[in-house]
Image (tube, rainbow, N blue to C red):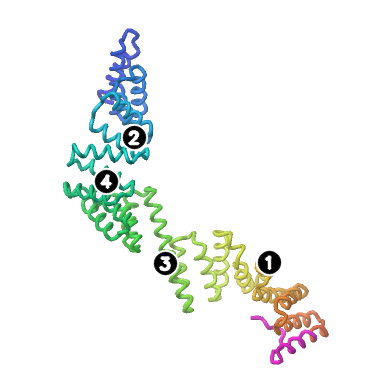
């Protein structure tokens, strides 16, 4: 604490001495508050200034310093009230005017904040900090032409002030001119090349311009310097998700061209970039199925279902059923096809696969029920009658089997009757 400790102790003796006058106590409280303020102990400083104001509400400097502390603590409404009390007591201070304007802005009193800042710039026309604050105030009310005017004046007064280029970059972004925004943030970084705030801004602009490679380069610089930077981590996470979506899009193009090996590579890259992307796993499972890599397909479809529970209500059950069938897990495949048919009762392909699985498991009575459903769905389909005839044949009901085979041929004389007619 250096020299502050003995000074604070001496002031406390004065404060606690019953023989001390109010003037002496107030003076001691003021010095205690200032000492704690210098030592960056805002709570103790605030307590001292508050006690001083209780003793003498007409002590303007106490109101001002209390306001400074409250503003730093993010209590802008209370800070504004303290500054106004100081102003009412005719306390004049350039810093008070600036901080009062800041408290007005934070209390959403933008109009009065701009008036106060404009008033200050009339007396200090070359004060770049004031002009910068005024530009930011105009940004807050979306008056970008005025904001540009003020920040351009700052740059004219000091073309080496990096924050001015940063703010102008913000304005250009808000106006939708990302190329100009990139030029300005690059200028800011030439002056202050390791400023994380500027690097994050540049990353966001590059992402808007779809320049993901350079965006990644810039955000990694931030994370290298500050691995725990919350904003940088979130942006990097979002960037990886975007890159994953690009890989998925590329994979889908390969699927259209039936280049399944290339498609699987792109899906794998997407998963590497974003392990939470359920669609990448879901779609890669279908590629593995097409490549007859059934175990890998099953792993992917299970992962997709874990990541996205809504898949359980959709066609994932049909695809999963086919994978399980080809692995040889017939009973599990039957359960999956049953879920699919419950969700989509009219899914003819799903019913055909269920009949196939049930027949493979020699559950002909259940297969017969599904074959009858096929006939109800499409009573004019020769295939439906033929399938029912096949099942009845396996059940040993030869007469009934012949009856349905005959109906199939009646509908389509060229239909080839066989015991296996599945697609």
- Give residue 338's position: percent from left, percent from top: 68, 68
The disc placed on residue 342 is 1
- Give residue 215's position: percent from left, percent from top: 33, 59
Secondary structure beneath label 3: helix
- Give residue 179's position: percent from left, percent from top: 28, 61
Image point (31%, 38%), residue name: 112
Q: Are marks 3 and 2 in contact (CB under 8 Å)?
A: no
Which mark is in front, 4 or 1? 4
C-alpha distance separating marks 1 and 2 = 61 Å
Image point (49%, 79%), residue name: 258
* In the displayed structure image, the side of residue 307 where residue 227 appears, left or right: left
- Give residue 308's position: percent from left, percent from top: 55, 60
The disc placed on residue 72 is 2
Q: Are marks 4 and 3 in contact (CB under 8 Å)?
A: no
C-alpha distance separating marks 3 and 2 = 44 Å
Q: Which residue is mark 4?
A: 135
Q: Which residue is mark 3?
A: 246
Which mark is in front, 3 or 2? 2
């Amino acid at each position: 604490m250096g020299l502050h400790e003995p000074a604070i102790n001496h002031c406390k003796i004065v404060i606690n001495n019953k023989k001390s006058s109010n003037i002496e106590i107030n003076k001691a409280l003021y010095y205690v508050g200032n000492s704690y303020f210098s030592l960056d102990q805002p709570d103790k400083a605030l307590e001292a200034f508050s006690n001083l104001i209780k003793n003498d509400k007409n002590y303007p400097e106490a109101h001002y310093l209390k306001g400074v502390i409250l503003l730093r603590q993010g209590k802008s409404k209370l800070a504004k009230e303290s500054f106004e009390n100081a102003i009412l007591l005719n306390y004049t201070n350039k810093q008070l005017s600036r901080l009062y304007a800041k408290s007005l802005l934070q209390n959403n009193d933008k109009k009065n904040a701009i008036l106060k800042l404009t008033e200050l710039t009339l007396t200090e026309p070359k004060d770049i900090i004031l002009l910068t604050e005024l530009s930011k105030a105009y940004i807050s009310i979306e008056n970008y032409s005025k904001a540009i005017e003020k920040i351009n004046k700052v740059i004219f007064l000091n073309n080496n002030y990096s924050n001015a280029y940063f703010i102008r970059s913000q304005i250009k972004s808000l106006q939708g001119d990302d190329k100009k925004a990139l030029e300005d943030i690059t200028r800011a970084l030439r002056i202050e090349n390791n400023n994380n705030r500027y690097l994050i801004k540049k990353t966001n602009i590059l992402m808007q311009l779809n320049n993901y490679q350079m965006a990644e380069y810039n955000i990694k610089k931030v994370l290298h310097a500050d691995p725990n930077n919350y904003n940088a981590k979130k942006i990097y996470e979002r960037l990886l998700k975007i890159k994953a979506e690009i890989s998925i899009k590329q994979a889908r193009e390969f699927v259209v061209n039936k280049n399944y090996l290339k498609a699987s590579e792109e899906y794998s890259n997407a998963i590497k970039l974003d392990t939470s992307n359920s669609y990448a796993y879901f779609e890669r499972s279908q590629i593995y199925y097409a490549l007859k890599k059934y175990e890998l397909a099953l792993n992917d479809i299970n992962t997709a279902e874990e990541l996205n529970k809504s898949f359980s209500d959709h066609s994932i059950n049909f695809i999963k059923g086919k994978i399980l069938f080809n692995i040889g897990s017939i009973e599990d495949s039957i359960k999956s096809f049953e879920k699919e048919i419950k969700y989509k009762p009219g899914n003819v392909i799903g019913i055909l696969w269920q009949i196939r699985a049930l027949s493979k498991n020699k559950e002909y009575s259940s297969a017969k029920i599904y074959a009858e459903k096929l006939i109800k769905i499409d009573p004019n389909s020769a295939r439906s009658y033929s399938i029912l005839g096949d099942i009845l044949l396996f059940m040993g009901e030869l007469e009934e089997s012949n009856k349905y085979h005959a109906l199939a041929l009646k509908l389509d004389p060229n239909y080839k009757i066989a015991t296996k007619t599945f697609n």
